[in-house]
Image: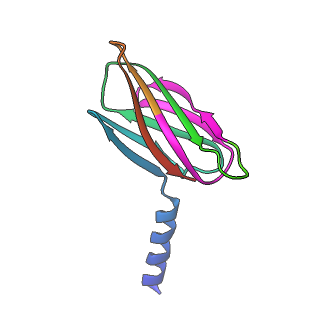
Amino acid sequence: MKKLAILTLGAILLFAAGFQKHVKYRGFKIDIISTKPLSVGANSFLLHINKKNIKDVKVKFFMPAMPGMPYMESWAKIEKNDQGYKANVKLPMAGTWQVHIFITTNSGKKYRIKTSVNI
């Protein structure tokens, strides 16, 4: 009985865990962290970027057009805080969303980091 209770608690904690995605690109290490799994509707997450000389960050979620469905796109609203960058985005449907993170450094150099998430 005790083992069953421990297994059940472990399964609940596993499924209750939030969302984390780690992306590396040309010296950038970006962590996308959410306290809850990303889902259809409003989502909030943090971006941790290892570089300090960043002027601007933008995040675009999009889903390419498919038969019977148009192209969909949602831009995250970004706010810089002491933990990194807080982002809010509304995703209208489930599926695989492409994520492009646009970073502009203080020197004006621009980077586009690509990844994807499954909702």
Q: Position of residue 6 (x, y in %)?
A: 44, 76
Closer to the camera, 56 or 26? 26
User: In this rendering, would 113 be left or right of 98?
Assistant: left
Q: Position of residue 55 (x, y in %)?
A: 40, 16
Closer to the camera, 34 or 118? 118
**Magenta segment, principal secondary structure?**
strand
Q: Position of residue 61 (x, y in %)?
A: 56, 39
Q: Residue furthest bottom?
A: 1
| Magenta part of the chain | 71-100
Residue 85 lies in the magenta stretch: yes
Q: Residue furthest left?
A: 27
Closer to the camera, 85 or 110? 110
- Report the number of numbered marks: 0
Q: Residue furthest front?
A: 67
User: In this rendering, would 69 be left or right of 28?
Assistant: right
Q: Position of residue 70 (x, y in %)?
A: 70, 43
Query: Residue sitting at 28 percent across and 33 percent down?
Result: 26
Closer to the camera, 51 or 15? 51
Query: Residue sitting at 73 percent across and 52 percent down?
Result: 68
Q: Residue furthest top?
A: 107
Residue 27 lies in the magenta stretch: no
Model colouring: rainbow
User: In which quadrant of the rendered view does residue 83 lie?
Assistant: top left
